[in-house]
Amino acid sequence: MVDIFIQQLLNGLIVGSIYALIALGYTMVYGIMQLINFAHGEIVMIGAMVTITCINVLLDAGVQLPGPLLLLAGLAMAIPVSMLLGFTIERVAYRPLRRAPRLAPLITAIGVSIVLQQAAMLIWGRNYRPFPSILPTEVHDFFGAAITDLQIAIIILAFVLMGGLFFLIEKTRLGRAMRATSQNPDVAGLMGVNINTVISMTFVIGSALGAVAGVMVAANYDQAHAYMGFMIGLKAFTAAVLGGIGNLWGAVIGGILLGIIESLGAGYLGDLTGGFLGSHYKDIFAFVVLIAVLIFRPSGLMGERVAERA
Amino acid sequence: MSIARYSMIAAAVLALTACGKQQPADQSTASSPASTPAAESSNGGGDTVKLGHAAPLTGNIAHLGKDNEYGVQMAIDEINAAGGADIGGKKIKFELVSEDDQADPKTATTVAQRFVDQKVVGVVGHLNSGTTIPASKLYSDAGIPQVSPSATAVAYTAQGFKTAFRVMANDAQQGKVLGEYAVQKLGAKKVAIVDDRTAYGQGLADEFEKAAKAVGAEIVKREFTTNQETDFNAILTSIKGAKPDLIFYGGMDAQAAPLKKQAKKLGIAAKVMGGDGTQTPEFIKLAGPDSEGQISSSPGQAKEDMPGGKEFLSKFKAKFGTEVQLYAPYCYDAVKVLVEAMKKAGSTDPAKYLPELAKTDYQGVTGKINFDEKGDVKNGAITIYTVKGGKWQVLEVVGGAAQ
């Protein structure tokens, strides 16, 4: 049974590192402008859809490339598209509302999310899009558990990207400007930080991470569709809250924790409750966790208690 | 504690959008409920009557819903092109009112109410058992005959509604054939079962389980998922631990395809089997090369082997520019059966032609159609297919004499 447990942990780690990447997008935006960007899930979806389209176009054109290179080509297309989209959303939908009451941008975010979802449905249709079968599917044995090359790549890439983000935030000029803006945008502005650029960059970076996560989801679960952004976005948002929204480490830990909780929960719930609750209750774990966190530790696992803002 | 309060608000707003996210019904052909009831009954003098059709036209099985709609559309267009059907000495034309039930039982009852309000003379639908069953109550109350082309759950016709019919074999027949095939022909001794907890998936899986147990198989694992899920790694992993010879999935192709792929990625060697909801071209498209070896059944004969199959398939392709997915021939026959009954009764009034519908004896594209006292079709052929070389190939036809 140990091999099964390891497999469940691995499944959780894979989906958890994807959640973490998406959660970083939520948490970065929240950290800087206290906005929950609900359109982020849709950016993830569009990243996935653009990649699939791009790979299919290349395949149709008869391009002979190894699968992983095709995937990279798709990613190279999806990342700029998502970045541009993130930039545009901030510029068009959120910037005019920066001084508005908090609820206004929140509602706008939900509106943007619906618009993007419907637009995706117009462009790509309502059906599930299969991810082209271009990647090797043979499995490696990892202490009795099975793992594919893709899944290994997902975990490694997710951690590399997270490391890169921490480096960016902690060690670069832009990162310092971001941290300053998150502490106090007005003062940062007075110190010569270009707030608009910083906020735009936050959206652009978050969207790029989201696009990568979207491609990971599509490649690992072999399909994408216009409604996929909603649930995955909600889960990642939960992960961000779990870890402490606004805190980067929190997003990473929250994401991975949530992935593992979900995987173990779905795997063992049926056995533990004697078949009373089955594995189809998988999704409730994310939301039970969300509610528990809000009740017992409202600022999240890693979040600091913050004073009420005026 | 601003974060907490903020998150609470966010959660509340989200709960609202969760409902809002459902796309509004795609009412391409639906007319507004306020439109004048052009022809409540043919005796009123109008020469066009409305026929309802309901299926999921959005969401993950929209391809099947559209397929059903095309089947109905084709039958209606043919009748109208011939100047209408000869009913009670008048040429009656039909107008299709197609509604999107989103494969959601709650939406299905709304759609059904809309049909009742518009005084449609008959309904072809719904696609899923989970939507057909709650909707059938409304049709029964309003006395509107309902012919489902694809709802296979036993419960649908077991409710005792005089208005409920189906032109496809039910899950009791299908589950039995699948269970026996799995054990006796494929030699499966240990079986794992997964279903999507819909009326269809659960019903079929239960029937399969019963049949497989009866011929000596051991059910080593029973797992569940939903009809929205795409990640099956957790349940497949626990199934892997039980080392089954065969995994049976009760549900539709949108889940069956990723389930098959993910099983392969987890290194599971067990055969994978499913019902009619998985026996589609879309399944092969979604699962790609990993679709090889899938075993699925479908009530009725293979599309190509149906009495009017070849002709239907080529006419369908020419008209809509796409392949038949699954139930379109049954939808076509459902319309024809309704119209035949109207012709015999000489009226489009549901109360008048309903008795004729029960006595149907019609040679359709899918075979001979007779209903038993419950409204189930008598011809109970079940065909078992497998995917070989990227195509569905017939393994065996069980029961039901070819007509």
Image: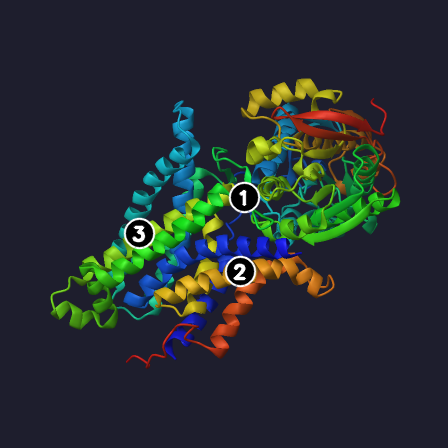
Element under disc 3 = helix
Q: Type of residue at label 3? A: Gly
Tell me the CA gap for discs 3 and 2.
Answer: 29 Å
Question: Which residue is at a point 53% across and 54% down the rendered structure image?
Answer: A10
Nearest to the eye among marks 1 and 2: give it.
2
Q: Can residue B95 be seen in this view?
A: no
Tag 3 residue: A86
Do tags 3 and 2 sit on the same chain? yes
Q: Type of residue at label 2? A: Ile
- Specify whether B108 is left or right of B43: left
Tell me if residue A112 comes above or below residue A67 in the rendering. below
Figure colour scheme: rainbow
Tag 1 residue: B58
Mark 2 residue crowding within 10 angstroms, few (<14) / some (14–19) / many (20+):
many
- Specify whether B12 is left or right of B200: left
Tell me if residue B19 comes above or below residue B372 in the rendering. below
Q: Type of residue at label 1? A: Thr
Tag 2 residue: A260
Query: Numbered disc 2: what chain?
Result: A
If the image is split into quadrants, where does the C terminus of chain B sit? top right
- Specify whether B192 is left or right of A302: right
Element under disc 2 = helix
Question: Which residue is at a point 61% across and 57% down the rendered structure image?
Answer: A5
